[in-house]
Amino acid sequence: MHLKTRENPVISAVIPAYNESQGLKEAITQIAGILSACESSWEIIIVDDGSRDQTYQHICQLSETEPRIKGISLSRNFGKEAAMLAGLEYAAGEAVFILDADLQHPPGFIPEMIEKWRAGAQIVHAVKRSRKEDSAGKKAAAYCINHLISSLGGINIKNSSDFKLLDREIVDIIVYKLPERERFFRGLTSWLGFSEEYIYFDVASRQGDESKWSFWSLLELSITALTSFTSLPLRIVTFLGFATLILGFFIAGDTIISLINGQAVSGFATIIITLLLIGSFIMISLGIIGEYIAKIYEEVKERPHYLVKASVGVSKKSGITGRPAV
Ligand code: UDP
Ligand code: MG
């Protein structure tokens, strides 16, 4: 652990925003107020993830009144994972926060997280204590997905959120040393190791309208989370293969006995059942393999994670190879 003894560290806050014009100004004003109370040097980077409303115009207005508020506008909706990465690539701070634009990640915890960082933590995770706002279905889905990934992928993401503080060293690793296309940020930060600390928060009510995640985008995120952290589903396919093989031996024996006893036709039902069973196992197995192949295809295409259409206040990408001065 290395203690942060620097007098005036620069703190960055990365905020992905998709169609957030309704509550954005209020959220940014609150976050800016809290950052100002903590440190003199800070910046807020709002990443407009291809919003169809006035989000980017609001970012420009905010930036005009406070130049420490900066914005990037992506050419289309690339998803929250890509938007967060874009923000991290442009962030120049020694400590970088990631928070939602809807105040569901309470900015009131920022000072406590900075304290933990100053005390030597390189990643400060904010863990959700409750999910008051979410529907029973969403709670159950989040519980299942998080537990599944935690137990299969060998990383602990139970109740974790994207609300985090990352040290510059961690940001540089995420931006420069993890070349994978398909990202699951929450899992990646746990996978990294380093010195981690936790704070616990209650999920606040959502500012503005409803959640930006559709059922399909959540399903997609869950599949990415699973396939990028474990190959166990592929192994299950092999186990299923062995199981059906053993079943096959028994049924073959049964059929032969029926044949010897002259009752071969009565085995018709068994054959139909076996065909159905094996057929479905093969379909599932192909589907699982297909998921992994699709991921490999995504990786080899090496397309950029996002494209920037416009920006305000930011100069160039940060990191080891040249950090812009704030
Ligand atoms: N978001 C984004 N791109 C998307 C979907 C969401 O940048 O495609 C942002 C959104 O603006 C918000 C954060 O990600 O700042 C979390 O989204 P939301 O509040 O809809 O999700 P939930 O609170 O349900 O996890
Ligand atoms: Mg939210």
Image (spheres, rainbow, N blue to C red):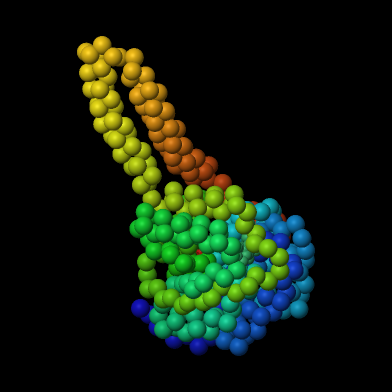
Instruction: Tell me if 142 is positioned left or right of 21 in this view.
Output: left
- Residue 317 showing in the rendered view: no
Count of marks placed on residues? 0
Q: Is residue 257 visible?
A: yes
- Could you tell me which quadrant the N terminus lies in? bottom left
Residue under the image location 44 percent in, 51 percent down: 226
Q: Position of residue 123 (x, y in %)?
A: 44, 72
Of residue 262 and residue 172, the one placed in the foreground of this image is: 262
Q: Where residue 58 sits: x, y (%)?
A: 76, 69
Q: Residue at x 61, y 84 (%)?
A: 34
Give above or below for 273 relative to 86: above
Rendered location of residue 149, percent (x, y): 41, 56
Residue, x 63% and y 54% (percent of image)? 214
Above or below for 34 versus 235: below
Q: In what quadrant does ligand 2 lie?
A: bottom right
Name the quarter where the C terminus is drawn.
bottom right
Q: Which of 280 and 156 is in front in this view?
A: 280
Q: Where is residue 60 in the image (x, y as percent from the top left)?
A: 75, 69
Which residue lies at the image location 66% right of the left edge and 54% below the top edge?
A: 77
Q: Which of 206 and 278 is in front in this view?
A: 278
Extreme residue in the top direction = 262
